[in-house]
Image (cartoon, rainbow, N blue to C red):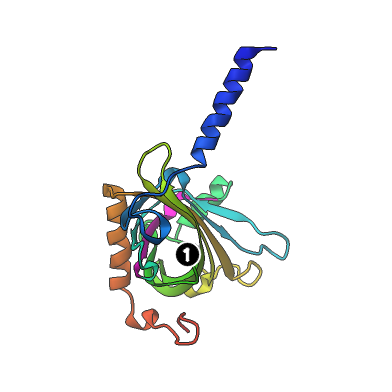
């Protein structure tokens, strides 16, 4: 038996176990972590877009340039807010020419509208881990409401970074034609599914704070009519 190899495997499994475990933080409220500002952990945050392509498949587009902050109220989750900015130039399709086309005037026009943003309107918790996040998405300087279904996956003292961390998943849909992205509709579906996997670490940084301002400015400059929500659904008509 190769004892060195066995010891190395044991070390790997010990490290993997540590990555999946963490301790609650004292006075951490409902989630076990304190209220305050949490910045996007870029190495563990993902945004994907999916749509039905010519009745055949659901391509996955992924954004890699994501930043923003969570303002967490651990004792009253409904008071928490999220602000996100996504770099349009960072959207990847696995095809270089299509990446460039998406950034061009034909689609997102990244030179003039470099960010996709999200700003919170309200959060409605169903329990400590499930809820609906209502907010405003801005694409190409057009703002529309959206509702995201949220699952809070975990909150703890990060076992390796020794600071509070929270992770969640969120899903929602939008119609790209509402943002001037109606090219090839209906041959390529109008409805786009958004999926977010995110981790936020306690604290703020230059990039995350800048993303918050970009998100806030997008809403402040929006047509007031686009910020109206219906009483029945919480989403604009």
Q: Is residue 16 above or below residue 80?
A: above
Q: Residue at x 38, y 59 (%)?
A: 84
- Percent x, y of residue 226: 39, 80
The residue wearing badge 1 is 128
**Circle 1 crowding by C-alpha within 10 Å: few under 14, some 14–19, many from 20:** few
- Quadrant location, the N terminus: top right
Q: How many marks?
A: 1
User: In terms of depth relative to the viewer, which is nearer, 78 or 70?
Assistant: 78
- Percent x, y of residue 73: 33, 63
> What is the quadrant of residue 12 in the picture?
top right
Q: Is 87 colored magenta in this rendering?
A: yes
Q: Which residues are magenta?
A: 79-92
- Percent x, y of residue 117: 39, 63
User: In terms of depth relative to the viewer, which is nearer, 221 or 229?
Assistant: 229
User: In terms of depth relative to the viewer, which is nearer, 135 or 123?
Assistant: 123
> What is the quadrant of residue 76 in the picture?
bottom left
Q: Is residue 175 visible?
A: yes
Q: Is residue 113 visible?
A: no
> What is the quadrant of residue 114 in the picture?
bottom left
Q: Is 227 colored magenta in this rendering?
A: no
56 vs 202, left or right, is right
Q: Secondary structure at mark 1?
A: loop
Q: Is residue 226 above or below residue 169?
A: below
Q: Is residue 140 above or below residue 68?
A: below
98 vs 218, left or right, is right
- Percent x, y of residue 82: 37, 62
């Amino acid at each position: 038996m190769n004892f060195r190899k066995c010891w190395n495997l044991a070390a790997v499994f010990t490290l993997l176990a540590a990555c999946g475990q963490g301790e609650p933080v004292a006075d951490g409220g409902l989630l076990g972590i304190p209220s305050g500002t949490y910045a996007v952990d870029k190495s563990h945050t993902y945004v994907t877009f999916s749509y039905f392509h010519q009745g055949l498949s659901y391509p996955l587009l992924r954004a890699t340039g994501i930043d923003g902050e969570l303002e967490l109220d651990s004792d009253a989750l409904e008071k928490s807010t999220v602000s996100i900015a996504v770099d349009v130039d960072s959207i990847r399709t696995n095809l270089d020419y299509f990446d460039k086309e998406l950034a061009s005037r034909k689609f997102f026009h990244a030179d003039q509208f470099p960010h996709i943003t999200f700003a919170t309107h309200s959060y409605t918790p169903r329990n400590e881990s499930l809820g609906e996040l209502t907010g405003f998405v801005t694409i190409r300087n057009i703002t529309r409401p959206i509702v995201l279904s949220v699952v809070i996956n975990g909150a703890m003292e990060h076992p390796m970074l020794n600071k509070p961390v929270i992770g969640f998943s969120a899903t929602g849909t939008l119609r790209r034609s509402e943002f001037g992205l109606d090219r090839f509709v209906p041959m390529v579906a109008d409805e786009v599914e958004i999926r977010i996997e995110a981790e936020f670490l306690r604290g703020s940084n230059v990039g995350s704070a800048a993303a918050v301002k970009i998100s806030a400015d997008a809403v402040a400059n929006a047509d007031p009519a686009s910020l109206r929500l219906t009483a029945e659904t919480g989403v604009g008509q």
